[in-house]
Image (cartoon, coloured by chain):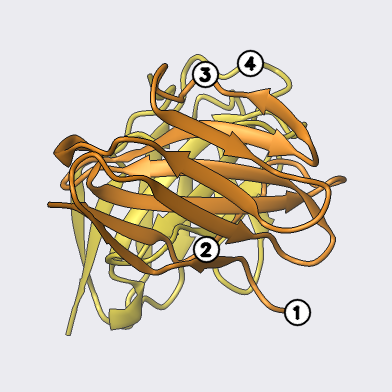
Chain colours: A orange, B yellow
Amino acid sequence: NAGVMQNPRHLVRRRGQEARLRCSPMKGHSHVYWYRQLPEEGLKFMVYLQKENIIDESGMPKERFSAEFPKEGPSILRIQQVVRGDSAAYFCASSPLTAGNEQFFGPGTRLTVL
Amino acid sequence: DAKTTQPPSMDCAEGRAANLPCNHSTISGNEYVYWYRQIHSQGPQYIIHGLKNNETNEMASLIITEDRKSSTLILPHATLRDTAVYYCIVGNNQGGKLIFGQGTELSVKP
């Protein structure tokens, strides 16, 4: 059973461009979480999604950031008009419907904004 | 804000037991204690969780005090590959966000 997959692993964007980060959860997992880790800082929750629904987006910045988890395909975290402060590691985690809070994390996408 | 308090760093000799403490004095009756770790630059890894009984799996043991206000994660025979930041997190078992604090940076030394 493959683990959580994220791509790309590294992404470089110039200020003002768009960044699209993809997350494929583990097989059978219908819950997806996105977290961000700024340089030298801790992990911060961003958004929690189930298939086609946003359950909790309390950690998402109000502007430029959006997330989706369609019925088919991976979850997407989209950052529009990136700024240097968006440079960070973005981690996706998944969990199965019946689990508690045991979340399985992907390797992360490291976004660098020039 | 995280609902747990952990020492910022600890050292442990290779082959010895590593005992990582965590205070969670405001834990509520239906909340579990979860432990995760993050090895440098990698995604966090689930280790173990418990409600009130002590728990053991292939990675570690979790000892929770009777009043549930604190717990200890035990790595019985630490190896160099156990060097990581260890996070103690309190939460329910119905899913939802994990609130990471600063964790304990464990350094296992030869």
The circle on residue B28 is 4
Residue under pointer 2 = A106
Which residue is pictured at 42% across the width and 57% down the height?
Answer: B37
Q: Nearer the viewer, mark 3 or mark 1?
A: 3
For the residues beneath circles 3 and 4, the answer to whether they share a chain is no
Task: Name the chain letter of the residue that bears numbered label 1.
Answer: A
CA–CA distance in space, label 2 to label 4: 30 Å
Per the model, the C-alpha gap separating discs 3 and 4 is: 22 Å
Q: On screen, B81 above or below B90?
A: below
- Is residue A45 found left or right of A15 in the rendered image? right
* Secondary element at tag 2: loop
Question: What amino acid is at disc 4?
Answer: Ser
Residue at (67, 54) in percent of width and height = B55
**Which residue is pictured at 61% across the width and 29% down the height?**
B91
Which tag, 2 or 3, sits closer to the chain's start? 3
User: Which residue is nearer to you in this view: B65 or B5?
Assistant: B5
Q: Look at the picture and state if A65 lies above or below B14.
A: above
